[in-house]
Amino acid sequence: MGTVAVVGAAGIIGPAIVATLAEQESVERILALDVNEAGAREVAESRGAGKARGAGLDVTDLEGAAAALEGADVVLNSAAYRVNLDAIRATLAAGSHNVDLGGLIHVTREQLELHREFRDAGVLAVLGMGSTPGKTNVMAARAVELLGGDVERIVVAAAGRDPDPPAGPLVAPYAVETILDELSMPTPVIRDGEVVFLEPLTDAGTVEFGEPVGPAQTIYTIHSEQATFAESFGAREVSFQLSLNPAFLDKIRLLTELGLAGTEPVEVRGARVVPRHVLLALLARLPKASPSHRAFGIHRVEAHGAGGGPAVVECITSAVDRLDFGGGVLSTACPPAVVADMLCRGELSAHSGVLPSERCVPYGPLFERLERYGVRVREEAPAGSESSPASRSSSSPSCH
């Protein structure tokens, strides 16, 4: 039986993580922690099934955070990626395992530098274990296995839709500030083994996601797969392509083009203000609204080799009746909760250090457990490979 501390418990994804952890038999106690102490306590009370207690936490205070996390077997960081380094350092100081939802390429690279310290301490930090990065990283490992040969190119594509969005000018599928970064920062892709930066919002073409999305336009965005896939798989080309709801993307694009995503101060009537700070402050004044129960997420990973391909692994996450979260939120919340359960059970004890999820989380056990959270997976192997027939649905994925 284990104790799991959830950092950022009062955010968009945190409550669903707490609810998912509460269903795990291996999790005896949940610490719901957030800089918003009142929010953390409310989440613990409403989502923790009697296992959770809430408290305030400033994870940027290393000494205080390490003391608060002491005794936790696993620290699951669902806060904004900007505090990933603070959270992982506090986790190391507490002697706990770490799971997070991923950083962007630069943050992930900095986290990987702590590999030796985690290895020497005999604990594991699993980087990028949400929906994407997360499920898609583990799917990429399976796609490479299905390819059956050297991989040259990996394409990760993600789409989210909400057929019944709540009222509000800007209802986000995940943290607004992260979305602003993804759509305003230079966008890395791996080409010929080297990182190349594209302009923000660069068109990435149409991806066929299948039902219920179908063909959808995508854009390249900054992500963390570009920090690890080349080393993990030997891929010389890696890209992440995102398809947001078109109406939501139009709103974010307008805000970005107006400069409201900017982080450099501008002068307004003699005062210097940061446009993004103003935007976030105004958004915080709006009534809190989350994606509806009908929201869902779709992810597709393709692995291409010199001899052909692609090998494809796809999954779709829809809502489940017993949990009142949409599939888009569950898509991100359930994978880290399941991996925290694996850590509490000692199932990942062969690994230590700081590792991206594709190198330490087994595909079969992960997706078998995610089935009860509305995740369905489909595999497609290249014609002529040992994994043919070329397409099969998998309710019990094989472990790689």
Image: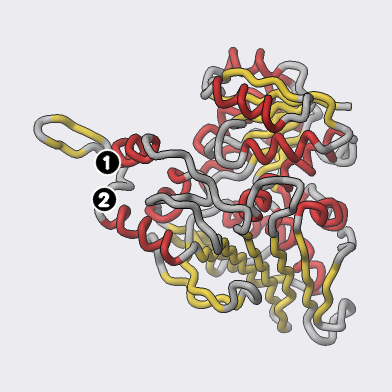
What residue would you read off at disc 2? Answer: 259
Which mark, residue 172?
none
Left or right of 387: which side holds 237? left
Q: Are marks 1 and 2 in contact (CB under 8 Å)?
A: yes
- How far across and down, in percent of the image, does residue 398 sit? 89, 62
Instruction: Check disc 2: other Cα within 10 Å, few if <14, some if 14-19, many if 20+.
Output: some
Q: How far apart are marks 1 and 2 (CA)?
A: 7 Å
Instruction: Check disc 1: other Cα within 10 Å, few if <14, some if 14-19, many if 20+.
Output: some
Residue extending furthest toward the bottom: 384
Left or right of 48: which side holds 26? right
The structure residue drawn at horizontal position 59% and vertical position 13%, both measured from the top left corner, is: 64
Please identify the quarter of the rendering in which residue 13 is found: top right
Total marks placed: 2
Q: Is residue 158 above or below residue 289?
A: below
Please identify the quarter of the rendering in which residue 264 is found: top left
Please identify the quarter of the rendering in which residue 305 is found: bottom right
The structure residue drawn at horizontal position 23% and vertical position 37%, both measured from the top left corner, is: 265
Q: Is residue 89 above or below residue 16?
A: above
Q: Is residue 64 above or below residue 27?
A: above
Q: Which of 284 and 343 is in front in this view?
A: 284
Viewer can see residue 132? no
Mark 1 residue type? Pro
Which mark is first along the chain, 2 or 1? 2
Circle 2 SS class: loop
The structure residue drawn at horizontal position 89% and vertical position 40%, both measured from the top left corner, is: 347
Viewport quadrant of the N terminus: top right
Left or right of 184: which side holds 152? right
- How far across and down, in percent of the image, does residue 289 sit? 49, 44
What residue would you read off at disc 1? Answer: 275
Circle 1 SS class: helix
Mark 2 residue type? Gly
- How far across and down, in percent of the image, does residue 130 sit? 66, 48
